[in-house]
Image (cartoon, rainbow, N blue to C red):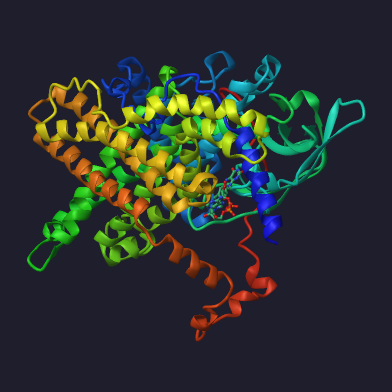
């Protein structure tokens, strides 16, 4: 069993390694941070949105707002599980499905910043409606076609997609979540190679039940490299009217109840070879590259969630009097409010900075986007929890019930449910940690891992060892020298100057610690997820601090005496420093060994004695009670014709 597990794990790791983008074509601020090289000049001055571009976004948000106000009642969407068809058609008519599609193909050609602003604006009103648009163009067909598609594919599909032919992304399968190596959907080539027959099932495909055009990942025949079988995952454009395509089940969820999501079945679906995106075997790489920028709408929406909590809490914490004062004045409530504000500023700064990096095209953003996704979704979730707590019983009550009692219909309960999914989709938080750790360690992995890999022949090891020694003899001593970053900051307070110096100094400490962790654990470091998580969290906090300080500087330049802003960023940085100190301590001194022991005992059933005296029939639900609420099967949304 252990042997099989290890083989499976190695296969998963090998596939992940093959599919990652190996080159760093552009500088990466965060990758340098992990190497002990804090490059303040990469993030300062803050890359503010160009005013002309901002105007385009502002005007479009007004249009979207009018559509939402006319057609969408978010509580009704939550109750019925449907976004009104009129809303989808109206959004299609104003180009909502073509925001990320270039103008030459009939799209709006928005910048990443404007696209994120619009989707997060919609999300702050109705999360389900936002998901319709973002599943279509953050991960659906438009993005991979833009980057990897052929001219013919772009001309054929992008104009349709821009007009509102809904698209979806189908990777997950019943056995494939975070681990695509377990994929079993196949695409078998015809004898003459002119088409492929697609067979299999895809799970939880957002927009899948209403999509006209989908990107589907499937296994094409394996190839043999150095005597070893190498799995080939390939991306196909599939149209839902191809015979053999079927929506097998509509899924329903805790939140975002108005999304369309289902199990898709493919039975001998004949897909022409021209529908392959990129090359055979490049599917996973295409998916991962697409997600690098694609996942930025998630932190943007999470940030909008934070802003929503701030906005909806403010009057309440002033008006609600308990024990003689407004509840916000009780320090136990006050700390939640202060952190809400400080964290929202950090989330906004990280997201805006990452989007702007995409727009400028001069930076590698894979780490920044993953960190923004990880940090913002985790923080937004705890902020939603605070929001519910601050609202007390009214935070737990549904909008319908509040309204019926004549209370303000503040949807804290729905917002909490809607938010939860963002820590799972487009890379769970745990997978984001692994992704960040791998990219952060690239300097070392690329130099040291081939030496440690038992599969590397001995004759090849010596030159690698000599090269690595040459590198580390120069690199390591530098990690003990003071940071040479030029902190050209005119307006920041003395406190914030200190914070900036701290980021420079701590970046070096992080680089050293990572190096020594690798020397200590060697290849087993990959298994030390709790240690790696500490370093990932430190790096993420350093990025959040740098982004917040840079943005604060940019805002303070316009209004130097704004003490409230200085306090805001000061609070965020002080909190971050405490977390960082904690994480360094936990990486060094921990009882992870004990965690592992208790975990093993639990998994082996040795604590089953504790779970007596509870109702256990849940283990064997009757077929009837197990059946999820069926959604009415919807006809695919027709392509919205311009002007129709
Ligand atoms: C509402 C919704 C919409 C979705 N939309 C789409 C879509 O449009 N297209 C699509 O293809 N998929 C979609 N998904 C699937 C989604 O991407 C997966 O749920 C997600 O990738 C996690 O996979 P999983 O649920 O199978 O969890 P698993 O991979 O089974 O993971 C279970 C738990 O184990 C953890 N875990 C797994 N591997 C590791 C590891 N190596 N180290 C540490 N922890 C690990 C995970 O983080 C998680 O906490 C959607 C899912 C939902 C619920």
Q: Work out whether 331 lies above or below 120.
A: below
Question: Residue 558, percent across and down?
Answer: 15, 22
User: Left or right: where does residue 546 sit relative to residue 231?
Assistant: left
Residue at image position (79%, 33%) is 223
Asked whether 413 or 477 is in front, the reply is 477
Question: Residue 458, percent across and down?
Answer: 66, 34
Image quarter in which the N terminus is found: bottom right
Asked whether 282 or 359 is in front, the reply is 282
**Number of numbered callouts drawn:** 0
- Evaluate whether residue 163 shows in this view: no
Question: Residue 468, percent across and down?
Answer: 50, 28
Image quarter in which the C terminus is found: top right
Residue 145: quadrant of the picture: top right
Question: Residue 44, percent across and down?
Answer: 27, 22
Residue extending furthest toward the right: 191
Residue extending furthest toward the bottom: 613
Residue 285: quadrant of the picture: top right
Asked whether 549 or 197 is in front, the reply is 549
Residue at image position (56%, 13%) is 104
């Amino acid at each position: 069993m252990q042997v099989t597990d290890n083989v499976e794990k190695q296969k998963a790791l090998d596939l992940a390694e093959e599919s990652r983008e190996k080159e760093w074509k552009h500088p990466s601020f965060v990758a340098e941070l992990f190497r002990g090289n804090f490059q303040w000049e990469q993030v300062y001055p803050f890359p503010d949105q160009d005013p002309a571009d901002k105007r385009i976004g502002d005007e479009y948000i007004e249009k979207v707002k009018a559509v939402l106000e006319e057609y969408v009642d978010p509580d009704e969407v939550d109750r019925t599980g449907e976004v009104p068809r009129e809303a989808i058609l109206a959004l299609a008519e104003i180009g909502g499905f073509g925001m990320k599609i270039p103008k030459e193909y009939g799209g709006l050609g928005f910048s990443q910043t404007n696209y994120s602003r619009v989707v997060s604006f919609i999300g702050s009103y109705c999360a389900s409606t936002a998901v319709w648009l973002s599943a279509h163009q953050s991960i659906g067909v438009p993005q991979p076609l833009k980057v990897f598609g052929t001219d013919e594919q772009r001309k054929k599909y992008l104009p349709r997609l821009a007009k509102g032919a809904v698209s979806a992304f189908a990777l997950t399968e019943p056995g494939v979540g975070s681990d695509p190596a377990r994929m079993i959907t196949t695409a078998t080539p015809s004898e003459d190679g002119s088409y492929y027959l697609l067979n299999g099932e895809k799970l939880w495909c957002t927009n899948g039940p209403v999509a006209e055009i989908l990107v589907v990942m499937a296994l094409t025949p394996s190839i043999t490299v150095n005597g070893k079988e190498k799995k080939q995952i390939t991306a196909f454009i599939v149209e839902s009217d191809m015979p053999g395509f079927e929506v097998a089940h509509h899924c329903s969820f805790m939140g975002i109840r108005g999304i369309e999501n289902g199990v898709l079945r493919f039975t001998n679906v004949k897909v022409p070879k021209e529908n392959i995106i990129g090359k055979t075997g490049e599917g996973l790489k295409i998916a991962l590259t697409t997600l690098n920028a694609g996942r930025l709408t998630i932190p943007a929406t999470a940030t909008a969630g934070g802003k929503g909590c701030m906005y909806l809490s403010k009057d309440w914490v002033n008006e609600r009097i308990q024990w003689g004062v407004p509840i916000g004045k009780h320090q136990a409530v006050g700390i939640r409010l202060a952190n809400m504000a400080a964290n929202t500023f950090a989330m906004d700064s990280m997201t805006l900075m990452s989007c702007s990096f995409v727009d400028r095209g001069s930076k590698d953003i894979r780490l920044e986007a993953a960190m923004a996704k990880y940090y913002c979704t985790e923080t937004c979730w705890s902020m939603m929890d605070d929001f519910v707590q601050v609202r007390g019983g009214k935070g737990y009550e549904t909008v319908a019930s509040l309204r019926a009692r004549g209370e303000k219909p503040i949807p804290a309960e729905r917002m909490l449910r809607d938010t939860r999914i963002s820590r799972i989709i487009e890379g769970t938080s745990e997978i984001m940690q692994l992704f960040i750790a791998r990219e952060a360690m690239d300097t070392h992995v690329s130099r040291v891992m081939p030496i440690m890999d038992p599969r590397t022949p001995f004759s090849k090891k010596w030159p690698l060892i000599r090269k690595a020694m040459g590198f580390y003899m120069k690199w390591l001593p530098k990690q003990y020298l003071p940071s040479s970053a030029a902190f050209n900051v005119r307006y920041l307070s003395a406190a914030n100057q200190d914070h900036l110096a701290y980021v420079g100094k701590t970046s070096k400490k992080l680089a050293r610690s990572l190096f020594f962790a690798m020397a200590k654990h060697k290849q087993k470091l990959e298994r030390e997820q709790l240690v790696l998580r500490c370093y990932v969290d430190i790096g993420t906090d350093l990025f959040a601090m740098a982004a917040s300080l840079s943005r604060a500087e940019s805002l303070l330049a316009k209004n130097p005496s704004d003490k409230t802003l200085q306090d805001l960023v000061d609070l965020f940085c002080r909190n971050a420093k405490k977390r960082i100190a904690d994480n360094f301590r936990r990486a060094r001194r921990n009882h992870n060994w004990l965690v592992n022991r208790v975990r093993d005992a639990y998994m082996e059933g040795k604590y089953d004695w504790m779970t007596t005296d509870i109702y256990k029939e849940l283990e064997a639900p009757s077929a009837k009670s197990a059946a999820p609420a069926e959604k009415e099967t919807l006809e695919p949304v027709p392509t919205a014709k311009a002007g129709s």
